[in-house]
Image (cartoon, rainbow, N blue to C red):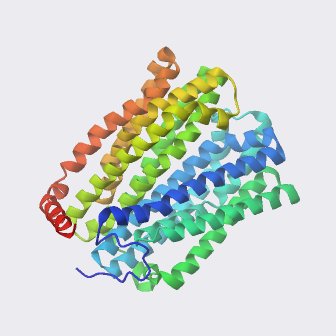
Amino acid sequence: MKTLTRKNTAVDLLHGPILKAMLTFAVPILLSGVFQQLYNTMDTVIIGHTLGDEALAAMGAAAAIFDLLTGFALGIGSGLAIVTARSFGSGDEEQLKRSVAAALVIGVIVTTVITIAVRFILYPFLEILHTPPEIIGESYAYISTITLFIGVMFAYNLCAGLLRAIGNSVMPLVFLILSSMLNIILDLFFIKQLHMGVRGAAVATVIAQAISVAACLLYICKRADILIPRRKHFVRDKALYREMLAQGFAMALMSSIVNAGSAVLQSGINGLGYLVMAGHVAARKLFIFLMMPYMAVSQTLSTFVAQNYGAGQMGRIRKAVKTSYLCGAVLTAVITLFTLPLAPLMVRLLSGSTETVVIGNGSLYLRVVAPCLMILALLNPTRFALQSIGNKILPVISSVIELIGKCLFVMFLIPRFQYMAVIFCEPVIWLFMDMELLLAFWRNPKVLAGRQEERELKEKDKVHS
């Protein structure tokens, strides 16, 4: 097997100790998640403190559309990068460059179609979401500006995905930090100095991301030129385009269905009263932070599996998936021990509320869900691993199971059992998803074929230790 040069790669995922490589790769991804949340929080703080509640509500009304578009862009970028990671693992530089060229072509076409299509559906969609008349104008101004430059968002996520595909998770973090700092500065300039209102926040986001994309492209040209295709690499390859379209849209669809499920569940929560909603919002924001280490491990595994699948190292894949499960078990134990006694304090600090209903419901949610994160620690790595070995259908089916499950809870269980049904909704659905995904992965013929190689790796580890 030919090995591509690793002078531009932060972490070698194809050789050496698996746990060390995965943790080294995962830490920058975890920090990226934290900065992304801080990025979103600062937008909220600046708009709320500068423009007031109405402007904050206008941006919040567009949040569902923004999350859907962000998830789609992130999903399709990650899916396209899977093929690049496999090519890197196989040592096929020509195929790697062809995959990057195909990703660029697909990206231009997809973003052009989306940009045109959303022009016709944005305002009606805001009306469908029952956006109040007094803020719908500002909501439309904000989200229409974002969607006009959806190509920037896609380019931002694709660049990060391609760098991670060759083992570099550090530079995407650097560019995210740059984007976050620029966004804060530009928010203050456009909103406070130019008095552009909510639209100013959208313009700031687009410009910050565009500058980060330019910096990322400059870095790739200087330090990661393996990702730069030439004219000959834009050759029409039906098999490659078919595979990349399938991978990209499978990941994007999976993300979109998950976001749709969250919107459905939220509709059920909205009928339980504002105090219940307040407690859940506070607990959910804390839950997002608790989930970040799990997502970092899963995203790391996605790149690890894709590279090693390209290299034909199924034994390392089996061992890495089990390692991710072990990391999940340790994380769950630590988070549970931390959350059980401190849940009321965390909810009170985040919500600023002294209402017993708010603190009680938020605390109960965290205390029940924290130990159930072990179910999620099995689910997400397995789903990402299946995607990376080319199984595109079953991960999407798992998202459909999640959507159907949330619809059933909203229709039948939440009206009867109130907030207790909300608390147990996702853990119960995760169990059903786990059953489907674990059976699919560990019974996969390619995964089964790696058992002997995994045994050999264990023997080597014993010798070295």
The residue lying at 79 percent from left, 38 percent from top is 53
Give the residue at the far left of this rendering: 452
Whether residue 391 is visible here, answered yes or no, is no
Give the residue at the far top of this rendering: 416
Could you say which quadrant of the image residue 298 lies in?
Answer: bottom left
The residue lying at 56 percent from left, 25 percent from top is 361
Could you say which quadrant of the image residue 369 lies in?
Answer: top left
- Nearer the observer, 367 or 447: 367
In the image, taking residue 325 as reference, residue 292 lies left or right, namely right
Q: Position of residue 301 (x, y in %)?
A: 36, 58
| Quadrant where the N terminus is found in the figure | bottom left
The residue lying at 63 percent from left, 40 percent from top is 125
The residue lying at 50 percent from left, 69 percent from top is 170
Q: Position of residue 148 (x, y in %)?
A: 66, 59
Whether residue 69 is visible here, answered yes or no, is yes
Q: Position of residue 342 (x, y in %)?
A: 55, 34
